[in-house]
Image (cartoon, rainbow, N blue to C red):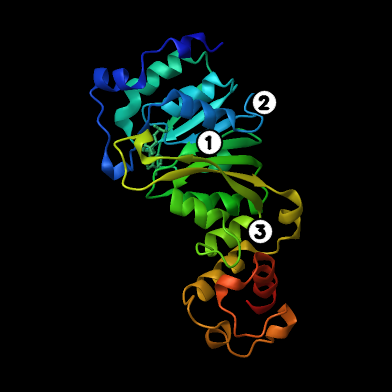
């Protein structure tokens, strides 16, 4: 089933043949290293059982690895129409397993993709990565069956997603992610792995929605508002930002800064105070 994919010419040759150059405005930093793309794809839980949605296939390096790893169905969403000549060759080689939607992933309604549940796997464009992630967290909170997300981010963003209270990178992203899912960095990726080479390092984060956490959640929108308010002035004591709060109720004194407050405490406070 994967022979035709394995026999395609290398991604770099296909790009040359189709005259495709990486474009900065689409955040295009491509992966050509088959070991790396294979590792990322094989780390997607249940890849052979549930559909995989990929944002930004570009010239299809990661897409090919996902197909080679045995995915039965891949839906890829790409904004840059000039990748079509390459993607159509991969579609032809995929035996009906790959569908490509040319659109902006920020505008696509993921609930209307026609799959009941799915995994997301992507080397995300750096300029819209966090916005996409927050959108998916909201979707999961409202019942969308996203079973896992295996996502490449700039390393600093990966740390912001996976950090814990008191860590340097702890903030809104960590609070929202941690109230919905379990997350960890699974692969550190050096900038030399990309073409063109970005200035910063990257990392793959795996985010697995946790049903118990989701069941206990009240309103992610309110939690987002509260984190924006308290982390917006992260150097200030919380009582200076929000006077007239009975902090003791949350095991706090009011002299803390947002970076010390646990995700579960943010959730309780958002439920009561907003
Ligand atoms: N998956 C390829 C790889 O790993 O080599 C390309 C990854 S590159 C970092 C990001 C890809 O996302 C590019 O192909 C880019 O055109 C696409 N992209 C950028 N913004 C997008 C958006 N809003 N919606 C869908 N695709 C987007």
- Looking at the image, which residue sits at the far left? 19
Q: Is residue 14 visible?
A: yes
Separation (CA) of disc 1 from disc 3: 21 Å
Labels 1 & 2 near each other (Cβ < 8 A): no
Q: Secondary structure at mark 2?
A: loop
Q: Position of residue 214 (x, y in %)?
A: 71, 54
Residue that mark 3 sits on: 179
Q: Is residue 257 left or right of residue 249?
A: left
Q: What residue do we see at 44% from left, 23% from top? A: 34
- Sort mark 2 into few (<14), some (14-19) or many (20+) by Cα contacts within 10 Å: few
Q: Quadrant of ligand 1?
A: top left
- Work out whether 53 lies above or below 259: above
Q: Quadrant of the C terminus?
A: bottom right
Residue 120 sits in quarter: top right
Q: Position of residue 135 (x, y in %)?
A: 53, 52
Q: Position of residue 228 (x, y in %)?
A: 51, 70
Count of labels shown? 3
Q: What residue do we see at 53% from left, 29% from top? A: 39
Q: Secondary structure at mark 1?
A: strand
**Is the C-beta of the residue carrying label 1 under 8 Å from the nearest atom of ligand 1?**
no
Residue that mark 2 sits on: 49
Q: What residue do we see at 56% from left, 71% from top? A: 259
N-term mark: 2 or 3: 2
Q: Is residue 108 visible?
A: no
Separation (CA) of disc 1 from disc 2: 14 Å
Please tell me the numbered disc located at residue 121. Answer: 1
- Sort mark 3 into few (<14), some (14-19) or many (20+) by Cα contacts within 10 Å: many
Separation (CA) of disc 2 from disc 3: 27 Å
Labels 1 & 3 near each other (Cβ < 8 A): no
Between 227 and 168, the residue placed more toward the observer is 168
């Amino acid at each position: 089933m994967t022979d035709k994919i394995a026999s395609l010419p290398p991604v770099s040759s296909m790009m040359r043949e189709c005259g495709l150059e990486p474009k900065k405005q689409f955040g295009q930093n491509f992966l050509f290293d088959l070991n790396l793309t294979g590792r990322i794809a094989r780390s997607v839980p249940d890849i052979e059982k549930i559909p995989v949605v990929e944002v930004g296939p570009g010239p299809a390096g990661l897409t090919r690895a996902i197909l080679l790893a045995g995915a039965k169905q891949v839906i890829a969403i790409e904004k840059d129409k000039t990748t079509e000549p390459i993607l159509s060759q991969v579609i032809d080689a995929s035996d009906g397993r790959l569908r490509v939607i040319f659109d902006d992933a920020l505008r696509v309604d993921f609930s209307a993709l026609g799959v009941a549940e799915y995994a997301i796997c992507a080397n995300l464009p750096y300029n819209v990565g966090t916005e996409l992630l927050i959108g998916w967290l909201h979707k999961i909170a409202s019942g969308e069956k996203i079973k896992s997300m295996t996502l490449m981010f700039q390393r600093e963003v990966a740390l912001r997603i996976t950090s814990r209270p008191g860590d340097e990178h702890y903030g809104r992203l960590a609070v929202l992610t941690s109230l919905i899912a379990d997350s960890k960095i699974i692969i550190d990726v050096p900038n030399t792995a990309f073409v063109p080479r970005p200035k910063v390092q990257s990392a793959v984060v795996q985010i697995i929605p946790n049903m118990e956490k989701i069941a206990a959640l009240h309103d992610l929108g309110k939690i987002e508002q509260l984190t924006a308010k308290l982390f917006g002035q992260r150097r200030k004591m919380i009582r200076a930002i929000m006077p007239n709060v009975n902090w003791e109720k949350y095991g706090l004194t009011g002299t803390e800064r947002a970076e010390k407050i646990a995700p579960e405490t943010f959730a309780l406070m958002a439920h009561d105070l907003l």
